[in-house]
Image (cartoon, rainbow, N blue to C red):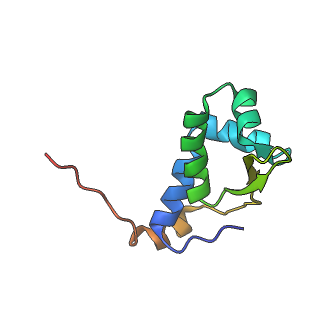
Amino acid sequence: MIHFNSGNELLLVLEALSNPHRLKIIAVLSEGRQYVSHLARELGISRPLLYLHLQKLEEAKIVSSDTEILETGQAAKYFKLNDFHFELNEKIIHALSSSLTVKKKNN
């Protein structure tokens, strides 16, 4: 279960989950860890775009990665889904609201 220590941590998770590509990544990884190239082919997106989405998910601690050396000597990066569960309701939002960092736009 994910426990939020600040409003910014809550936002990080919500932002990570607010994209259809990232939700599809989670769906695929729920079936088991995947090699990046295979994951990109399965999702039909480029590796650079996939890495951007994986980075967001990793920052939110929803996925994690490890690198393995294949028999060919090449390094292969694998991603796996971390078990996650969190509760969200008005009381939690209220408790965390004072720790939110609001970015000001430069005019």
Observer-nearest of 49 and 24? 49
- Assign the C terminus to one quadrant of the image: top left
Residue 62 appears at what percent x and percent y?
Answer: 66, 56
Q: Residue furthest top?
A: 44
Question: With respect to residue 97, does 18 lie above or below?
Answer: above
Left or right for 103, reference 15:
left
The quadrant in which residue 2 appears is bottom right
Residue farthest front in this picture: 73
Residue 90, given in percent of the width and then of the height, sits at 53, 63
The x and y percentages for residue 69 are: 78, 53
* Quadrant, the N terminus: bottom right
Is 62 rendered above or below residue 93?
A: above
* Left or right: where 74 falls relative to 48: right
Q: Nearer the viewer, residue 69 or 66?
A: 69
Which residue is at a point 60% across and 29% down the rendered structure image? 46
| Camera-side residue of 34 and 13 | 34
The answer to which image quadrant residue 64 occupies is: bottom right
Label tally: 0
Q: Residue furthest left?
A: 107
Q: Nearer the viewer, residue 86 or 9?
A: 9
Residue at x 79%, y 44% (from the top left corner): 34
**What residue is at 56 percent from the left and 58 percent from the top?**
59
Residue 32 percent coordinates (x, y)? 85, 47
